[in-house]
Image (tube, helix red, strand yellow):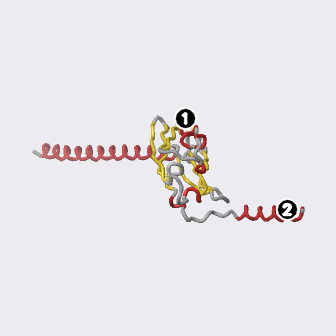
Amino acid sequence: MMVTFLTGILAIITGFYAWVTYKILLTNQLVVEEMKEQAEAFRRPYITITPYVVSGTPIIGLRIANTGQSPARSLKLNIDRDFYKFGEHQEEKNIARFTAFTETIDMFAPGAELIFDLAQGFKIFAPDADPKLLPKVFTITATYDFFGKKVTEKNTIDLVPFLASTQPRDLLLSELKNIREDIEKVNK
């Protein structure tokens, strides 16, 4: 009877240890998966698409950059509507027809950037601005591969927040302009 009792207790203790060991195994698997995801997130490419004001001008530009740590492969960019640079209705000014939006980019390296001038803010936000030439909101989709994975990201570009914003001032540029003007006065 005592042996049966001890055997029963031993079976319960062994079962408990087996259950705890199984839970530890599951937790370790989750930790390993999380570490893999974190390592991938650190090493992967990130395609960022942002509008910005070109320093010292009223021009709003568009920057497409790989801010990640590895190349984006087979990058395909797609803009959902036409955007004519500076509102000029000529096919060669249509950003949607530029090579970056019509051809696949085999490899977009870390730190690589594509810069496009869109138009002056006063043209984009003019009361009579044609939204078919100068849309204030549009979407750019970036599809690319990394580490055997395919990613598709949609980026809504909203230029409306730039309305009535103050243009950044570059003090160094202003000082250089003043020096140039002073030199021109001296040379006259």
Query: Viewer-proximal residue, 13 or 123?
Result: 123
Where is residue 50 shown, x and y percent of the image?
A: 54, 52
Where is residue 141 shown, x and y percent of the image?
A: 47, 44
Check disc 2: other Cα within 10 Å, few if <14, some if 14-19, many if 20+: few
The answer to whether 82 appears left or right of 1 in the picture is right
Q: The N terminus appears in which quarter of the rendering?
A: top left
Q: Which residue is pictured at 55% across the width and 65% down the height?
A: 164
Marks 1 and 2, Cα distance to the nearest angstrom? 47 Å
Q: Quadrant of residue 19?
A: top left
**Residue 40 image label:** none
Q: Secondary structure at mark 1?
A: loop
- The amino acid marked with disc number 2 is Glu
Q: Quadrant of residue 129?
A: bottom right
The residue indicated by pointer 1 is: 103
Q: Which residue is pictured at 63% across the width and 56% down the height?
A: 54
Q: Is residue 45 above or below residue 127?
A: above
Q: The C terminus appears in which quarter of the rendering?
A: bottom right
The residue indicated by pointer 2 is: 184
Query: Viewer-proximal residue, 63 or 89?
Result: 89
The answer to whether 24 appears left or right of 43 in the picture is left
**Mark closest to the chain's N terminus, 1 or 2:** 1
**Residue 99 shows up from this direction:** yes
Q: Secondary structure at mark 2?
A: helix
Q: Which residue is pictured at 39% across the width and 47% down the height?
A: 31
Where is residue 170 shown, x and y percent of the image?
A: 68, 62
Where is residue 73 shown, x and y percent of the image?
A: 53, 36
Check disc 1: other Cα within 10 Å, few if <14, some if 14-19, many if 20+: some
- The amino acid marked with disc number 1 is Glu
